[in-house]
Image (cartoon, rainbow, N blue to C red):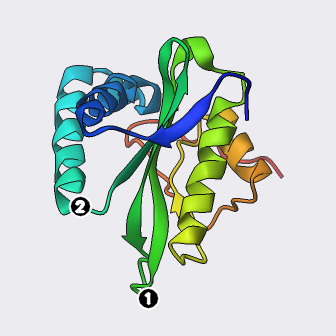
Amino acid sequence: MPSGIVIREAKKEEIGLIRKLSVEELPAELNEKELRSVEHAKEVFGKRLDVILGRGGNEFYVAESGEGIAGYVWFGVSERPFSGEKVGWIYDVLVLPEHRGKGIGEALMRHAVKVSREKGFDQIGLMVNAKNRAAWTLYEKLGFETEYRIMGKREGKSVSASKT
């Protein structure tokens, strides 16, 4: 764990800040079309967060430095899409920009994996934006593997044919 960083369960009064940070960091996850209406995307995303928060079973852990919260991980329970099996799920992990590159994201992820094991889950999942190379590189380093791919195509854009 990085020096001077403590990972602890978030206090109830910090959940609002975590929700706000999650919504504010959203533009980094948006595609080209969504970026044209960032405020609408934030509004829709915020409502979805509220639904997930309302279901219960959420746990939030913060990485705290002497300066305050440096990042967080949001852990909960989800189901495998075809079997209904319950699995640990990382809904969000975020390290504030001024604290990135110091090992905090890795420490938060390791903590979430530990919590998942302690709760008896033999599998933990997450989703990651294909453009977020730093995140998926970290997840692969921690043993996560790609299970599904969500692909999209914007109509009206040309698709170059591969040359053989």
Q: Marks 1 and 2, Cα distance to the nearest angstrom?
A: 22 Å
Residue occupying image coordinates x 40% and y 24%: 25
Q: Nearer the viewer, residue 48 or 131?
A: 48
The image quarter in which residue 47 lies: top left
Q: Nearer the viewer, residue 61 or 55?
A: 61
Mark 1: amino acid: Ser
The image quarter in which residue 79 lies: bottom left
Kindly identify which numbered label has been placed on residue 56.
2
Residue 34 place in picture, x, y as percent: 32, 30
Kindly identify which numbered label has been placed on residue 112.
none
Residue 37 place in picture, x, y as percent: 24, 23
Residue 117 place in picture, x, y as percent: 60, 70
Q: Is residue 125 visible?
A: yes
Residue occupying image coordinates x 41% and y 77%: 81
Q: Is residue 96 left or right of residue 141?
A: left
Q: Is residue 151 left or right of residue 14?
A: right
Note whether 136 is above or below 146 in the view shown.
Answer: above
Note whether 85 is above or below 110 in the view shown.
Answer: below
- Locate the N terminus by quadrant: top right
Disc 2 crowd rating (10 Å Cα; few below 14, some 14-19, many 20+) is: few
Kindly check if marks 1 and 2 are in contact, taking CB atoms under 8 A apart as contact. Answer: no
**Residue at numbered disc 1:** 83
Residue occupying image coordinates x 23% and y 61%: 56
| Helix, strand or loop under label 2 | loop
The image quarter in which residue 43 lies: top left
| Helix, strand or loop under label 1 | loop
